Every structure is written in C-alpha cells, then in structure tokens.
Image (cartoon, grey):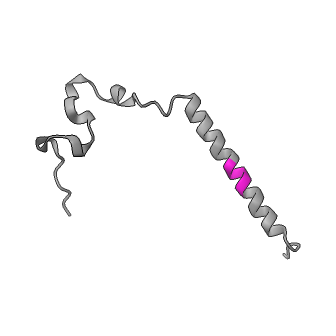
Amino acid sequence: MKLPEGIVAYLWTATGLVSLVIIIFGIYWAYKNGQFDENIKYIIFNDEDGDTQKPPHEQPESHQSAPKGK
C-alpha cells in the first residue's frame, strides 16, 4: 500500500496531538481526584511508625534497610 506523499508527517502530528490531549486529560483527572495529595503519607503511616516517614537518608543508622544480596 502506497501512501500519498507527505501524509506520514500528518499522521505523526495527529498521533502526537492525540497523545498530548490524553496526557493532559489524565493529569487533570488526577488533580481533580486528589492524586497529588502530599498528605498521603499520613494515611499510609501512623504515629507509631515514627521516623519511617522520613526519607532513607534522614533516618538513623538503626533503621537503614539491609543491603540487597544476590
């Protein structure tokens, strides 16, 4: 099947535009449904977890995860 001259560029452009619209819609949906809520750690963790809410580099040495073995 032989496509007309230059149609491939229009197909790529249309595909890119559709992809951008889908991505923007996905981000909008996530924003409206609270998917970017920074307080999610308070739902996952509780007060008994203590310093496990901190990133690994800020935790005391006693809470560092064990090195991964082979």
Q: What percent of the width, then of the height, locates residue 51?
A: 21, 33
Tell me if residue 29 comes above or below residue 17 in the rendering.
above
Q: Tell me what residue is drawn at x 87 percent, y 74 percent.
A: 5
Q: Is residue 49 left or right of residue 11?
A: left
Q: What percent of the width, then of the height, locates residue 68?
A: 20, 57
Quadrant of the snapshot with the N terminus: bottom right
- Quadrant assignment, res 46: top left
Read off the magenta span: 16-20
Number of numbered discs present? Answer: 0
Q: What percent of the width, then of the height, locates residue 12?
A: 74, 63
Q: Assign the magenta stretch its main secondary structure.
A: helix
Q: Is residue 21 left or right of residue 5?
A: left
Decide which of 3, 17 is in the foreground and name it.
17
The residue at the far top in this view is 47
Q: Tell me what residue is drawn at x 85 percent, y 76 percent.
A: 2
Whether the magenta-drawn stretch holds residue 1 is answered as no
